[in-house]
Amino acid sequence: MPKRKQLPVALTIAGSDSGGGAGIQADLKTFAALGVHGASVITCVTAQNPNRVRNIESCSPKIVRQQIETVFEELRPGAVKTGMLFSAEIVRVVASFFKKRDRLPLIIDPVMISTSGAMLLKPAAIKLLREHLLPLAALVTPNLHEAGILTGRKMTSIENMRAAAREIHAHFGCAALVKGGHLRGGCEAVDIFFDGRTELLLTAPFVKRVHPHGTGCVYSAAITAELALGHDLSDAVKLAKHYVTHAIARSYRIGQHFALGHFA
């Protein structure tokens, strides 16, 4: 019999997107595209499409905990990411589990609000995220709005982003990737990475007239996959920036919207 290929495992802990463009669905497509086996823990079910989030129902903390425990019993991940956690109770479950897991790369995508304005992380959960989960992370990947909430700074320039990345690292002890895709006035998507020693300025030209859903989820999932494949953190971030840039450039149409070209 031919020798079977061994794939590393990456785990996503996030919400389900019924439109298929973000959340668990985007993460699993990214993992598959990058050659890792994707395991998943669903934190909530959303009724959403690329235009709006109509409703959210969270899973019980008990089933979230049991999903994590059961994955780890047989499929220990090489790296883990969190996306939409939604409630304080779910944040507490995730933090409690990973507090006992030293040296496992944990990537926190602090999903707080959707593009359409729906709250994806309750106010009480933000406090717990700051106090109990971010100190366990290898990396946190806030967009401009989320970086503003974490630092109290308004993100209006690259210098603001640099200061925010350094402040996040100093306060929480984890590396930061501040994503500037929504920064106005430039012709490039600029992100700032800082891990206490290395600062990276990552740039890519904007793809005009294409606005796909789920780019933040895909970016953090790609970092997680690259870590599971054995890359160090700064290389994983650079490879993930390349991946998400090409996924945007190769977007395809679904109805009146665009979806990321994961496999193009």
Image: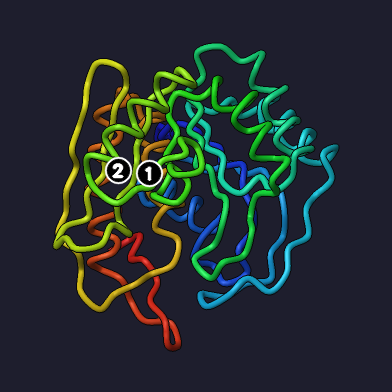
Question: Observer-nearest residue: 49 or 147?
Answer: 147
Q: Mark 1 = which residue?
A: 222
Instruction: Give the quadrant of the N terminus.
Output: top left
Coordinates of residue 224 in the picture (x, y in percent): 43, 36
Q: Residue at x 41, y 35 (%)?
A: 5
User: Height in image: 46 above or below 79?
Assistant: below
Q: Earlier in the sequence, mark 2 or mark 1?
A: 1
Task: Identify the disc placed on residue 76.
Answer: none
Q: Mark 2 = which residue?
A: 240
Is there any visible trace of residue 1 in the rendered image?
no
Q: Residue at x 46, y 52 (%)?
A: 217
Scheme by which the image is coloured: rainbow
Q: Give the left or right position of residue 244, taking residue 115 as reference.
A: left
The residues bearing labels 2 and 1 have C-alpha atoms spaced at a distance of 5 Å
Q: Give the left or right position of residue 231, taking residue 83 as reference.
A: left
Q: Total marks drawn?
A: 2
Q: Secondary structure at mark 1?
A: helix
Is there any visible trace of residue 105 in the rendered image?
yes
Q: Secondary structure at mark 2?
A: helix
Q: Residue at x 45, y 87 (%)?
A: 255
**Could you classify mark 2 by the number of other residues whose Cα lies within 10 Å: few (under 14), some (14-19), or many (20 or more)?**
many
User: Height in image: 8 above or below 159?
Assistant: above
Q: Give the left or right position of residue 87, taking residue 39 as reference.
A: right
Type of residue at label 1? Ala
CB atoms at circles 2 and 1 under 8 Å apart? yes
Question: Observer-nearest residue: 160 or 118?
Answer: 160
Type of residue at label 2? Ala
Coordinates of residue 243 in the picture (x, y in percent): 27, 50
Q: Give the left or right position of residue 13, taking residue 144 as reference.
A: right
Coordinates of residue 114 in the picture (x, y in percent): 54, 62
Coordinates of residue 261 in the picture (x, y in percent): 33, 65
Q: Residue at x 70, y 23 (%)?
A: 97
